[in-house]
Image (cartoon, rainbow, N blue to C red):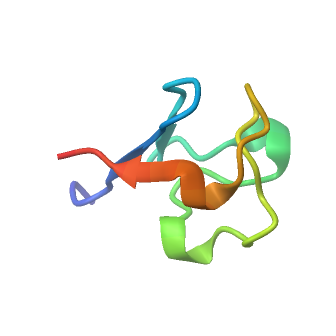
Amino acid sequence: MSDFKKYQCRECEHIYDEAKGDPDSGIAPGTRWADIPDGWSCPICGAPKDFFRVME
């Protein structure tokens, strides 16, 4: 599926790629942004989920 999106942390610029997920944090590849728990935070700087913006 090619409609995966990427989201970038506004604090440290880390990129969450839906296609890759965040396996180190227990987020499987293919996990949509909306399906990530609200308590998840940036694995690099610890910023909350709402600090991320969708990349165009």
Query: Residue drawn 74% across and 72% down?
Result: 37
Residue 32 makes an appearance in the image: no
Query: Residue drawn 71% across and 43% down?
Result: 47
Q: Where is residue 54 in the image (x, y as percent from the top left)?
A: 33, 53
Give the side of residue 46 with respect to residue 7, left or right. right
Give the side of residue 2 with respect to residue 11, left or right. left
Q: Where is residue 46 in the image (x, y as percent from the top left)?
A: 79, 38
Query: Residue drawn 76% across and 34% down?
Result: 43
Query: Residue drawn 51% across and 65% down?
Result: 33
**Relative to 53, does residue 38 appear above or below in the rendering?**
below
Instruction: Return the residue nearer the eye: 36 or 48.
Output: 48
Quarter of the figure that contains the N terminus: bottom left
Residue 54 makes an appearance in the image: yes
Instruction: Return the residue nearer the eye: 54 or 22.
Output: 54
**Relative to 36, does residue 49 appear above or below in the rendering?**
above
**Relative to 48, does residue 13 appear above or below in the rendering?**
above
